[in-house]
Amino acid sequence: MIHHDVVIVGGGLAGLRAAVGLCDRHDVALVSKVHPIRSHSIAAQGGINAALGNNPDARDDTWEKHTFDTIKGSDYLADQDAVEIMCKEAINVVYEMDHWGCPFSRFPDGTICQRPFGGAGFPRTCYSADLTGHVLLNTLYERAVAKGVRVYAEYVAVALAAEDGTCHGVVLIDQVRGTIIPVLAKATLFATGGYGRVYFHSTNALINNGSGIGMAYAAGVPMKDMEFVQFHPTTLLGTNILMTEACRGEGGYLINNKGERFMERYVPKAMELAPRDIVSRSIQTEIETGNAFENEQGLYVHLDLRHLGERMILERLPGIRRISIDFAGVDPVREPIPIMPCQHYSMGGIDTNTRGETTLKAFYAAGECACVSVHGGNRLGGNSLLDTIVFGKICAASIDEFLREQRRAPVEGVVARKKEEMEIKIRKLSDSGNESPFRVLDDLRKTMDECVGIFRTEGELEAGLERVLAIRERYRRVKVSSSALHMNYELIGALELESMIDVGHAITLGALLRRESRGAHFRRDYTKRNDQDWLKHTLVTRGAGGEPFVSYRPPVITRYQPMERVY
Ligand SMILES: Cc1cc2nc3c(=O)[nH]c(=O)nc-3n(C[C@H](O)[C@H](O)[C@H](O)COP(=O)(O)OP(=O)(O)OC[C@H]3O[C@@H](n4cnc5c(N)ncnc54)[C@H](O)[C@@H]3O)c2cc1C
């Protein structure tokens, strides 16, 4: 059995920031199923929000204005105390990353560049061309390694070891050596990223499947606000690679098959820079009303950057140009980019408080897998990178405090028992059954795309729930061809599939029950927000028989009473 003070599962921005905050005083292990630098954070393009006021158009910006924009963007579901913490701390963490060597783009006066993003009153998104995640992640990874964080790359966490309301560690599979490893830890942090790949069409990396959220749920921690799924307006037709919001932030247009800048009909003031939920619904409406282009890959509209000019595109959006040429054969300097909306971000996740604590003692969560909640019903672009770094840092501080006060050592027996349980499960998966895990996964993803998408109705959601329940039943008969642990993606996939089904189930159930429209959750049969009945977080907890149990909790409101959300 391996022993560490702290085990962090997740080598993205949240996990690395927490590791950097803890490793001076504690022995920290960082586990990631891929090399940390391949975490999805690397793909973030557009930027990170902080009210620095560097842009000449943003001299009056303040963290309070950032707070208000975020709460309004969340459709008033976010916990306002958490948003205040994040927006205030934003300025510190961006300068901290800057001092640690993160190469941000610069204005001529030497200050960090900031660009406009959707739903923000000021240009406050700090960036490094269209490679912001890349530079942030490399900066933190270098720092973590230099400080001696022990990195377990290509190890997959398959279960949390918890008993009597306390977490004692995790069980890992070492994919390279093909062994199963129990890890005893005084504190465990999940920074496992979002659940995008529960959907078929997603901008997320294939590893982002919500397995961490599912493992926490299996250990008794509630999932929060899972029905709030962000669909990004602009993803490349065919591959669904993200075309960053910065394309519109820099002045890009959205154009339909009639040559119209159609956002004029939906949000004439904010136009292309309305928040994502609104822009995605507008594009989907254009598609459904015959205003879209069509080719063998499907229906789409245009993202037009041509008027920005070659120089600006090369300087600010070089990655977007490269991706468009390589994956769509389109050079945005000369042609418009074909785009469609699809799944992008998980607003919901592991229920935590503002210190990253969960209902399970010694177990914490941060980053996209967590729901603090700072994004509520709809996340603003540029606020997620911020969430990962701020709450990664805060989690480090609360774990440090917990370790200094901790009286009882974690128990080896709990972790050893969990390991045995996993060994039995793995044997069973290869023993009997007739269902291919890949086929079941495919059906789950299609169900989520078809039944729990941008627009939702009671009928579709009921059908979706029925399909998820049938998928859950089929999972009992899943069989893998081998129980060998060495690089066995079929087996890992089958283990993770159970979590993905739980996640899909919670999304569908939460969406079916929520009879209103708020943020990214839009019901065609209940088109209005209903604060009277639904100004509350959804919590899904695993019942004794394994069934999901739904409860609700009001959001924290400090200074901003819910108002109509107009842009
Ligand atoms: C294409 C794209 C562009 C984006 N652009 C922006 C942007 O410009 N601005 C912004 O604010 N946000 C952006 N976002 C969102 C933002 O990038 C993510 O929310 C954020 O990076 C998530 O970081 P994280 O640390 O929580 O998780 P991730 O970076 O997703 O890392 C998750 C980690 O967990 C590990 N892991 C997961 N499960 C297991 C397991 N079972 N065992 C072991 N390891 C595991 C993975 O290996 C990985 O290391 C973008 C997202 C995408 C998909």
Image (cartoon, grey):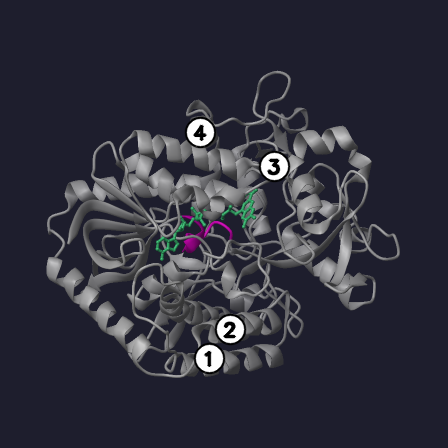
Q: Is residue 499 above or below residue 369?
A: below
Q: Which amino acid type corresponds to the residue marked 4 in the rendered image? A: Met
Q: Is residue 273 above or below residue 351?
A: above
Quadrant placement of the N terminus: bottom left
Q: Secondary structure at mark 4?
A: helix
For the magenta stretch, what is the residue range? 367-375
Q: Earlier in the sequence, mark 4 or mark 1?
A: 4
Q: Are marks 4 and 1 in contact (CB under 8 Å)?
A: no
CA–CA distance in space, label 1 to label 3:
39 Å
What numbered label is drawn on residue 130?
3
Q: Residue 350 location, x and y as percent?
A: 38, 58
In this rendered view, identify the residue nearer to me: 204 or 331.
331
* Label 2 neighbour load within 10 Å: few <14, some 14-19, many 20+: many
Q: Are marks 2 and 1 in contact (CB under 8 Å)?
A: yes
Q: Earlier in the sequence, mark 3 or mark 2?
A: 3
Q: Are marks 4 and 3 in contact (CB under 8 Å)?
A: no
CA–CA distance in space, label 3 to label 2:
33 Å
Asked whether residue 222 appears in the rendered view, the answer is no
What numbered label is drawn on residue 97?
4
CA–CA distance in space, label 2 to label 1:
7 Å
* Residue 377 highlighted magenta (yes or no): no
* Residue 368 highlighted magenta (yes or no): yes
Q: Which amino acid type corresponds to the residue marked 2 in the rendered image? A: Leu
Q: Residue 432 location, x and y as percent?
A: 32, 83
